[in-house]
Each structure stands twice: as structure tokens, then as C-alpha cells.
């Protein structure tokens, strides 16, 4: 029996491993072999051209903050925060905003009117009162009028996002800023962060009058590719076993249940081809979520290759994260700053202000690429999609179906067992008390009062079903624990390695129980109910048995799909 159980268990494991592999796809990203080499470590704009230096920098002016309302289409509106530099009138000594009464700057390419920047939000809902506070204030203190609008959500939700429509929404903020007294309407540009990097190219393609773009942590590649790239990096930083990476294409590549998420395949390429205004691309060198080298190469190839194309300046900030924030605590080169005690990289606002004030000369000032050495290890690429039977709706349907079978079948078997117990107790309670050794009488309860599972069937069925459910719950708990570690940039070998071993061990226990149950079914020639308590009752118990068995099998296939039973296949 032991040998047969071992052989049967091995056969089931091989079958589940094959099923998981056939569901596809695998994950094997290509490494980056040709890295970008910054020309200088110093990120200062015009490091080789002293003419760009000496322009207004952060902290030069006091900042006045004003709440404003920006009218959109169809009577809608959003709130915003306007931050203006407060300068002193050289004739009267009185304070004024935006440089209205200030003398023209002597910097290259500047006029008496102040430049302006509209901020474009990254992922999330984004309120003006919470977003870009440090960056917008720093730029305003450097003589640049900044406008942070609330994020308008009519074209933005988790399931549906329209980056082209969002560009139109932000355009109203651009027009608003162009009309602010003291702002030169010809020197208004945009500052787009993260997801906003898919909106900004649309804005400038539709409005060539925009003067410049600042892209902070711009993905450039389509959202689905960026999501898979980020997940891969986070998992590698956490130190998960190789088998866990199979979940990346299956989670990111599949069509999610209920449809939607079409924006995951948004391609910004057609809009990149239409860029003509200067672009400043900035990245935190330790940011693991952005394919920064790949993004820079793509933008350089598409927007700075020929006459009339947009000139591109690139900066990588050492020790900075996705938001170009750094910590005051000393961190290693590969440690990503996180937590609440962070602030902008000290050179970032200085460089943005110098670049904006110095246009158009700063757009082509050398070095073109400067800062820390970026470390993109793997390329972001199109994410392979699972087969139709691993589609999101199918996977969800299997999960719901298996749960229904397990709950329905298990409840029926439990109810039948409880009913047998109650009947037996009532019969025992009505029997006369006899002496020890008396033979049973016709008034004593018979051994069978209702249909029941054949001998030796209940235990392996219960173990198989229970442990399969425990394995699924363990897998979910494990993935949540890994996600928490990844987002906190932490490592914990006990959780990451030990947890994966524990989940797979549970899965093997369920398989062994299934093998025992299968052998016992064969031994009783598949007659899983031993008593005849009536034809209807026998059929109900039989159906309940197979419902639990089928639900366990379906759950096992789901576990195989997510890699619990993979054997390197």
C-alpha cells in the first residue's frame, strides 16, 4: 500500500506540474547588455557651460500660495494650488508676485515674464493639497510659477483610464496658468511624474505651444510592460525563489476578470514621434520600478534623432527613489529610500529650475546625460499572455466553482453524518438497560441508519479537501507577505524561502491524500457509499462525495497554475 501510494502521488504531482506548465507562460526576461554611461557625476545643468549657471535657484524668493478653481468642459471644475514667487519691486521695495514688476532676468532665453509649470499627477487620485508640495514650492522659490491641479477623475479609475482624454483635462490648467498675471504664456510647460509620463507627450503633441516638459520617473514603455518589469524587480530585491516568478506573466499578462484595463497596453510611441519641445528626463538611480535606461534610449531615439525633434536632457540622481526623494540616513548604493522621513534630492529642484530658466540654451547644454550610473538589469518587454483556459474569467470561474463544490458537497456530507449521529442517539436513549454481555435485541439501533461513505473514504477525502483549501489560503498569505516585504524594500529569508517551502509542502500533503483516496476508490470498485439508506439518500451522498473530490481537483489545478506544483518543467 505504501509503495502504491508513493507511485500514485508521484504520478499526480507530475500531472499537476505538466498542467501548470501547459497553462503557460513562463518568465525569462532578457538582460540589459549595453548600459547608459553618464558623461559626468555632477547633475548641474550646463556643467561644461558656465553660462547656464548663476540663474535663480530654490530659496531665492518667498512663495505665495493661492487656492484656485480651474474650469473644465461641461461645467466641471477642479481645485488647484497656485504658488508664485514674491519678489521686491526695485523702485518701491514693495512685494509683488510672479515677477510682474521685477526687472527681466539676464539669464539666457529669459524674458520679463516668469516661466510657469503645470504639474501632471502620477498614479492615484491626487489632491493638490497633498501632491508635489516640496517640488512645486522649491520651483516657485526659484522664480517659477507653479500650478498643481487636483486630479480630475472623470476619465480615470482602476479599471478604465483614458490618457488622451486626461491630456485634454490638464490642458485647461495650462490655459489657466497662461492667463496668470506675471506669467509669460510662451514659457509655460509641464512637469509630469510617473504615470503622467503617458499623458505629457499627448499634451505637447496636441499643443506645440507648450515650452518644455519635465518628465520625472517616466515609464515610456506601455503600462503592462512597466508593471511586469516592476514586479520582477521587486521580487528579485526580496529574494524570492525562482519558481515564484512564474506568477508575473500569469498575473500581469492575463485579461483580468470582467474586462476593462485596456489602458494597460497604451502605446505612447505615436505621441513620442510628434515631440518638438525640450524634454528633461529625471530618475532616481535606485528606483526599481522604472526601466529607466530603456526609457531614455527610446526617447532619445524617437525625439532627438533629427532636425526639428525635441532635444532631451537626462539626469540620474544618486540614492534617490521614484519621487527623486532621498533620506538623511546613510544608505547603501542599492537601498531604496522609503518611509516618511524623506525629502527631495538637494540637486533636483536646482537642476530643474536652472534648466527651465536657461531655455533654450539649456536644452542642448552639455553634458546631455549626467548623474549616477543607472542599474537596469533586465529589459521591459511585451508580456506573454496565458492560454484561453488561463484567462482571468476562466480562472475566476474555476475558483468560484471549486469553492461552491467544496462548500456544497462538504455541507451535505456533514449534514448526513450529523443526522446519522442524532438518529443513533435517539435509538440508544430508548433502549432498556441490559446487563453486560446481553445480545443485541431488535430494539437496539442497527449499525446503519442512513447512507454513509464506504470504510476508509471519509478521512482521505477530508484531508485532501481541507489541505487543498489550506494550501490556497497559504499561497494567498504568502504572496501578500512577499508583497509587503517588496514594497517596504525588505528581505526576510524565513518568510520568503520558508513560506514557499511551507506552501508547497501543504500542496504535497493534499496530493498524498488524493492518492490514498484514489487507491481506496479502486479497492471498492468506485462504490463510494457503503449503505443503502434509500436510493435517493445514496445518490445524494454519492453526489456530495464527487462534488468535494471535483472541487479539490479544480483547486489543485489552480494551485498548479500559480506554481505550487512546478518541478522545473
Image: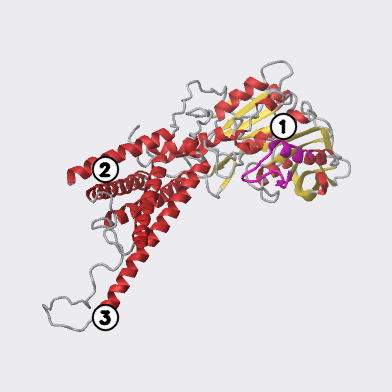
Q: Residue at x 27, y 55 (%)?
A: 457
Does label 3 or label 2 sit earlier along the sequence?
2
Q: Earlier in the sequence, mark 3 or mark 1?
A: 1
Residue 54 appears anywhere in the view = no
Tell me where the magenta segment starts and ends, as one range.
148-171
Label 1 packing within 10 angstroms: few (<14), some (14-19), many (20+):
many
Q: Which residue is mark 3?
A: 429
Kindly identify which residue carries mark 2.
9
Q: Quadrant of residue 307?
A: top right
Counting from the top left corner in percent of width and height, residue 76 is at: 80, 48
Q: What SS does tag 1 mark?
A: helix
In percent of width and height, residue 351 lies at 66, 33
Query: What is the C-alpha distance between the residues marked 3 and 2?
Result: 45 Å
Q: Is residue 440 left or right of residue 477?
A: left
Rendered image: mark on residue 202: 1
Task: Between residue 121 and residue 515, name the one nearer to us.
Answer: 515
Classify mark 3: helix, strand or loop: helix
Q: What crowding class fits label 2: few (fewer than 14 Cα within 10 Å), some (14-19), or many (20 or more)?
A: many
Residue at 45% x, 39% y: name it: 247
Query: Whole-percent x and y of residue 93?
Result: 85, 45
Camera-nearest label, 3 or 1? 3
Quadrant where the C terminus sits is: top left
Q: Is residue 440 above or below residue 537?
A: below
Amino acid at each position: 500500500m505504501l509503495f502504491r501510494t508513493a507511485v500514485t502521488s508521484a504520478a499526480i504531482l507530475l500531472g499537476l506540474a505538466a498542467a501548470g506548465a501547459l497553462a503557460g507562460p513562463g518568465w525569462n526576461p532578457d538582460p540589459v547588455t549595453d548600459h547608459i554611461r553618464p558623461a559626468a557625476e555632477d547633475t548641474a545643468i550646463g556643467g561644461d557651460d558656465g553660462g547656464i549657471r548663476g540663474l535663480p535657484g530654490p530659496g531665492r524668493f518667498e512663495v505665495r500660495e493661492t487656492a484656485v478653481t480651474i474650469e473644465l468642459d461641461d461645467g466641471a471644475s477642479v481645485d488647484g494650488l497656485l504658488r508664485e514667487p514674491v519678489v521686491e519691486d526695485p523702485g518701491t521695495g514693495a512685494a509683488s508676485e510672479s515677477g510682474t514688476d521685477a526687472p527681466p532676468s539676464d539669464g539666457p532665453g529669459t524674458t520679463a515674464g516668469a516661466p510657469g509649470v503645470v504639474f501632471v499627477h502620477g498614479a492615484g487620485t491626487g489632491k493638490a493639497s497633498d501632491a508635489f508640495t516640496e517640488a512645486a514650492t522649491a520651483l516657485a522659490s526659484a522664480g517659477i510659477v507653479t500650478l498643481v491641479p487636483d486630479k480630475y477623475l472623470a476619465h480615470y479609475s482602476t479599471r478604465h483610464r483614458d490618457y488622451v482624454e486626461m491630456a485634454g483635462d490638464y490642458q485647461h490648467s495650462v490655459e489657466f496658468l497662461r492667463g496668470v498675471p506675471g506669467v509669460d504664456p510662451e514659457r509655460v510647460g509641464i512637469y509630469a511624474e510617473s504615470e503622467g509620463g503617458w499623458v505629457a507627450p499627448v499634451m505637447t503633441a496636441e499643443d506645440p505651444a507648450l515650452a518644455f516638459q519635465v518628465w520625472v520617473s517616466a515609464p515610456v514603455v506601455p503600462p503592462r510592460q512597466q508593471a511586469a518589469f516592476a514586479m520582477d524587480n521587486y521580487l528579485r530585491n526580496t529574494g524570492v525563489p525562482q519558481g515564484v516568478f512564474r506568477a508575473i506573466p500569469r498575473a500581469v499578462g492575463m485579461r483580468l476578470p470582467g474586462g476593462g484595463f485596456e489602458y494597460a497596453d497604451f502605446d505612447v510611441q505615436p505621441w513620442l514621434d510628434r515631440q518638438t519641445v525640450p524634454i528633461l528626463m529625471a530618475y532616481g538611480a535606485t528606483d526599481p520600478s522604472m526601466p529607466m535606461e530603456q526609457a531614455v534610449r527610446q526617447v532619445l531615439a524617437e525625439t532627438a534623432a533629427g532636425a526639428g525633434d525635441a532635444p532631451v536632457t537626462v539626469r540620474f540622481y544618486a540614492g534617490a527613489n521614484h519621487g527623486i526623494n532621498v533620506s538623511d540616513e546613510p544608505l547603501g548604493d542599492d537601498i531604496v529610500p522609503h518611509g516618511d522621513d524623506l525629502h527631495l534630492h538637494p540637486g533636483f529642484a536646482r537642476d530643474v529650475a536652472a534648466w527651465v530658466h536657461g531655455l533654450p540654451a539649456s536644452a542642448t547644454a552639455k553634458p546631455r546625460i549626467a548623474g549616477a550610473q543607472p542599474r537596469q538589469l533586465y529589459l521591459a518587454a511585451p508580456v506573454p499572455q496565458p492560454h484561453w483556459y488561463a484567462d482571468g474569467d476562466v480562472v475566476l470561474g474555476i475558483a468560484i466553482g471549486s469553492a461552491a463544490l467544496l462548500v456544497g458537497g462538504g455541507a451535505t456530507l456533514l449534514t448526513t453524518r450529523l443526522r446519522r449521529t442524532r438518529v443513533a442517539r435517539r435509538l440508544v436513549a430508548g433502549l432498556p438497560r441490559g446487563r453486560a454481555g446481553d445480545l443485541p435485541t431488535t430494539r437496539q439501533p442497527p449499525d446503519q441508519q442512513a447512507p454513509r461513505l464506504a470504510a476508509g473514504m471519509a478521512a482521505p477525502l477530508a484531508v485532501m479537501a481541507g489541505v487543498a483549501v489550506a494550501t490556497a489560503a497559504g499561497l494567498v498569505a504568502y504572496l501578500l507577505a512577499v508583497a509587503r516585504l517588496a514594497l517596504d524594500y525588505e528581505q526576510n529569508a524565513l518568510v520568503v524561502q520558508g513560506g514557499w517551502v511551507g506552501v508547497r509542502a501543504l500542496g504535497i500533503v493534499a496530493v498524498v491524500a488524493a492518492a490514498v483516496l484514489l487507491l481506496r476508490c479502486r479497492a471498492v470498485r468506485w462504490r463510494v457509499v457503503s449503505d443503502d439508506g434509500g436510493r435517493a439518500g445514496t445518490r445524494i451522498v454519492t453526489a456530495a462525495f464527487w462534488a468535494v473530490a471535483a472541487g479539490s481537483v479544480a483547486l489543485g489545478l489552480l494551485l498548479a497554475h500559480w506554481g505550487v506544483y512546478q518541478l522545473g518543467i
